[in-house]
Amino acid sequence: MNATLAPDRAAIPVFPAADGDQAWQLLDDPAEWPAFGRELGAAGAGCWESQVVVEGMHCAACAFTVEAALRQVPGVIEAQVNAASRRARVVWSPAQTRPSHWFEASAKAGYRLLPGSDRSVRELRRRESRLALWRWLVSGFCMMQVMMYAYPAYVARPGDMNADSAQLLRWASWVLTLPVVLFSCGPFFRSAWRDLRMGRIGMDLPVAFGVLATFAVSTAATFDATGPLGHEVYFDSLTMFVFFLLTGRWLEARLRERTAGSLDALMNRLPDGVDRLAADGSWKRVAVRRLAVGDVVRVRPGEAFAADGVVIEGDTSADEALLTGESRPVPRPCGDRVLAGSHNLSAPVRVRIESVGEGTRFAQIVRLMESAASRKPRLALLADRVARPFLAAVLVSAAVAAALWWPTDPGRALMVAVAVLIVTCPCALSLATPAAMLASAGALARGGVMTSNLQALEALASVDTVVFDKTGTLTGDIPRLERIYCCQGMRPGDALEMAAALGAQSLHPVSQALVNAWNAQFRCAPGWAADKVAETAGQGIEGRMRRVRAAAGTRRRVRLGSPAFCSVAPLEVDAAQVHLADEQGWLASFVLVEELRADAAAAVASLREQGLTVRLLSGDRDSAAREIGARCGIDFSQGGCTPEDKLEVLWRLQAEGRQIAMVGDGLNDGPSLARANASFAFGRSVPLSRAHADFVVLGNRLATIPQAIAQARRTLRVVRQNLLWAAGYNALCVPLAIAGGLPAWLAGLGMAASSLVVVLNATRLASGAKESH
């Protein structure tokens, strides 16, 4: 495939093996960087965080190698490789390096990189899966034939079979073992040779050495039956070991794709192209990346929406399961907003594009999932640190075992060393944590909860207190305007117009409520414009206002917010309120009605059933906070809290030894979300790219909060089970192997089974979460 893109394809360069260097140079163009990464820090001055897929990696030792190769490149600040998801997160400085430099460094270490959003990744994995299946089939067929030829030697009594017959069976077994060694074992040998060239120890090195040693001993016995190694051959053990090992790895890869495949399923939901309305009224197929705000596109039933927009013609329904967690089709009549990545189900519609690229909700979700798939949780980092020294200990143990057995039986000594090498491969230890956490993150994603940090699953499992914000969390995203009070000479419509013009500059639910009220009543833009706007978190917003059609210079400083922020007296009403004031004083007050979410009380009850303490902290009046808390069943409610007050409460609770999960709307709650041990950003109005939370709830269901906590607890239990299994397996089998009680084929079966058990145990998390949702 050429690196040059066809006009109707929306992808970034794909790397053919022959001209990889030239393809890497294409990625040095800054225009390509957003396709597989994002900029950190101030625009033009920050570093870049890129997500890439690592080809040819299958274990933790491979992850160590790629990380080491990337970190040696000047300008690469951080590199994390997740062995379970085969994804890498690279933080690098454009002032010091370019993508081609660290792509080349990884390739020299033996692992090619592919951009995380490259559509060739799925095809690459499909090819790898087919080839792995062929290797497994060849090893299985040859193993059965070798076992058939080895069977007479096991059951024959002295004198039943002459020397020529025995030698013929050995030769037949040797011929049938050749395809296994030369073809099926190819990945082990290539990986081991790569490690040796780089001067490192990888997990395939013990396997390759064991296969070669067994084949060498058996070949020597076949060619020289009277020699020191000629009394026994191990072709049956060798082929059986390879078959079991390939079986375990193939099943492990399939299960891993199932448990951690939500990211790829999500990233491939965008279409390659879309029908765009041309200036002459015709429809033209264009690449998704060529869409711009204001374009009109046609989406047929079964197609995915390519960008966020509004339906301007037609009525349909959409599948938004992976984006919002809503499993049922969602009606999307004319005038409704549709999301990139969701699927049109019912009828052809025309959509006017409102957000493209990084501005879409889809792109922000993908960024969150990429971050989760590439970061390593703390327990995984600990297992990784243990794995490499453990590999060195494995080689020493094998050498000691061979030395102990050599005086008695040189042939048996080599086979004991092989068994030790094979049985102690720490694949299960390295997979124990990431396999479980990726399975859990994928399950949560299908339920509408995005995990931006895998480490947070461990923290969430240990929380004992859940703190809720009120507005936009326990109550609906946007309150409803109920009443307007105005000063003398100010009409309610004029007050609402000014408030809506200023509120349009804010994402706070109260501001959006005023904007919605204006749009619903007048259906036109306000006649005021605001500049030099500044928002004070938890207090309000202010700016200079001027009439759009008035003469220049007629400006007034206006504030919209709390009574204290606007320097006015609060209304004597038991409802949410916001005030409008200018330099002369009070202009108007707006009374808002907040509606409790339908499942708020049930969600709080579910949390309390799990033994959690639930608290409510709100910036609204204390009476309103207590009233909402009582309706939800929350015993500890506190109102009148500024962002600093909420932070102080969290500090105090954590000082008492409590583990806190904070649930907020991601706006005024940013400091609290960052401070909590685990945090949820709740509410559809929150821009995901600016959320400070570990988890982002995409839909409107509060029930996802207790479900996520229960899922995190199950995850930690499974991680502990996996670690105990991996440690117990090695503690039991290593002494057996050293004592000579574990043949090579059984060692191979044990090693494959240990990794398989770990991944199967992790798979329970995916199915269990799905049922809970």
Image: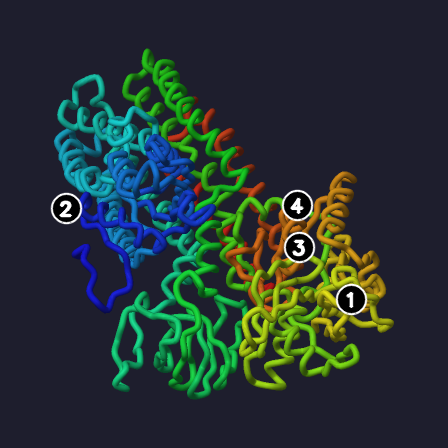
Task: Name the residue rendered at 77%, 53% in the picture.
Answer: 613
Residue beneath disc 1: 632
Q: Nearer the viewer, residue 619 or 221?
A: 619
**Marks 2/1: CA distance?**
64 Å
**Marks 3/2: CA distance?**
52 Å
Label whose residue precedes the other's in the sequence (1 or 4): 1
Looking at the picture, how far across and down is residue 105, in whole percent?
A: 28, 36
**Marks 3/4: CA distance?**
10 Å
Please, what is the three-letter code of the amino acid marked with disc 3? Asp
Looking at the picture, how far across and down is residue 73, in whole percent?
A: 32, 33
Q: Up-down: is 608 above or below 100?
A: below
Label whose residue precedes the other's in the sequence (4 or 2): 2
Residue beneath disc 2: 18
Q: Rate crowding at label 3 as few (under 14), some (14 to 19) or many (20 or more) other CA atoms within 10 Å.
A: many
Q: Rate crowding at label 2 as few (under 14), some (14 to 19) or many (20 or more) other CA atoms within 10 Å.
A: few
Left-right relation of 344 to 8: right
Residue beneath disc 3: 669
Please, what is the three-letter code of the amino acid marked with disc 1? Cys
**Marks 1/4: CA distance?**
25 Å
Q: Is residue 731 visible?
A: yes
Quadrant of the rendered structure where residue 711 is? bottom right
Q: Is residue 151 visible?
A: no
Q: Residue furthest top?
A: 407
Q: Nearer the viewer, mark 3 or mark 2?
A: 3
Task: Name the residue rendered at 83%, 61% in the picture.
Answer: 622
Label whose residue precedes the other's in the sequence (2 or 1): 2
Q: Nearer the viewer, residue 535 or 247?
A: 535
Q: Nearer the viewer, mark 1 or mark 3?
A: 3
Quadrant of the rendered structure where residue 530 is? bottom right
Please, what is the three-letter code of the amino acid marked with disc 4? Arg
Task: Name the residue rendered at 32%, 20% in the picture.
Answer: 413
